[in-house]
Amino acid sequence: MIGCLLCLVLREYHRPQAVLLSVGVCLLLLLGMSGDLQHIIVTASGLYAESRLDPGCFTVLCKAIGITWLTQIGNDICKDCGEQAIATAVTLCGRILLTALSLPLFGTLADLVLEVIG
């Protein structure tokens, strides 16, 4: 909240510095949550290891979550800068990355369906 208030005040006088402060606050928040994020990954990987699913799927899932989080943060920062077109492009790039990342899963799913049917 303090970072948000500082950005709000700084935006009145020095808009470029307010954007840099906003990015810095985002990075500090992400670094501060790294321990919790590590705990989530360890717990989820343990649960996933107990399942009989392909281990590559868990990697894809973790990457997809990371892409969505970073895309959202990038989108919001661009909107704060007043750059709606760039924010839209960031969102589109995130969607393209997610589609490219998920393509191997479609092949795995198709093989599974064919195995069940045939």
Image (cartoon, helix red, strand yellow):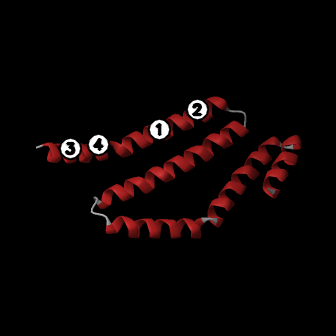
Query: Please, what secondary structure does the residue beneath circle 4 have?
Result: helix
Label 1 belongs to which residue?
95
Label 2 belongs to which residue?
88
Q: CA distance from mark 2 to mark 1?
A: 11 Å
Badge 4 or badge 1: first in the primary sequence = 1
Q: CA distance from mark 4 to mark 1?
A: 16 Å
User: What is the quadrant of residue 113 in the picture?
Assistant: top left
Label 4 belongs to which residue?
106
Badge 3 or badge 1: first in the primary sequence = 1
Label 3 belongs to which residue?
113
Residue found 28% across the figure and 59% down from its top = 53
Query: Mark number for residue 77?
Result: none
Query: Please, what secondary structure does the residue beneath circle 3 have?
Result: helix
Q: Mark 4 Cα within 10 Å, few/some/many (few <14, many 20+)? A: few
Residue found 62% across the figure and 47% down from its top = 73
Assess whether mark 2 and mark 3 are in contact (beta carbons under 8 angstroms). no
